[in-house]
Image (spheres, rainbow, N blue to C red):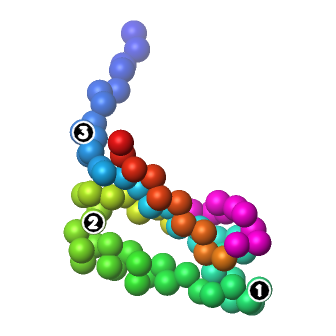
Amino acid sequence: MSIKAQPGPTRKTMGQVVACLRCCRGRTDQKHPAVPADWLKAEWRRRELPEKVHLTLSGCLGPCDATNVVLVMSGG
């Protein structure tokens, strides 16, 4: 007998913003500007964006010669 997990509630968002944070981005020791991650998360919450647009602070998004890459995806 197997137990199947019931799907939980899903939130519908307008899209997602993925900001590159770890790897070369934000590395001031490599002459990249710092990524204001704490400020970004605080502003996201203050503006009540988590229910509308999902924020992800991610690893490398490439290209590595660019600085502080951000990917914006619409929910369609």
In depth, the one of 52 and 7 nearer the eye is: 52
Q: Main secondary structure of the magenta part?
A: loop
10 Å neighbourhood of mark 3: few (<14), some, or many (≥20)? Answer: few
10 Å neighbourhood of mark 2: few (<14), some, or many (≥20)? Answer: some
Q: Position of residue 76 (x, y in %)?
A: 35, 42
Q: Which mark is residue 9?
A: 3
Q: Quadrant of residue 1?
A: top left
Q: Position of residue 36 (x, y in %)?
A: 49, 84
Query: What residue span does the magenta drawing correspond to?
Result: 58-66
Measured in 3D between alpha carbons, the distance from the residue under mark 1 to the one under mark 2, in whole angstroms, is 32 Å
Which residue: 29% across, 50% down?
13
The residue at which mark 1 appears reads as 30
Does 6 sit above or below residue 21? above
Kind of residue indicated by mark 3: Pro
Does 46 sit above or below residue 64? below
Q: Is residue 56 left or right of residue 43?
A: right
Kind of residue indicated by mark 1: Gln
Q: Which mark is residue 49?
A: 2
Q: Quadrant of residue 34?
A: bottom right
Of badges 3 and 1, nearer the viewer stands: 1
State yes or no: discs 3 and 1 in contact (Cβ < 8 Å).
Answer: no
Say which element carries label 3. loop
Q: Is residue 14 magenta?
A: no
In depth, the one of 42 and 64 nearer the eye is: 64
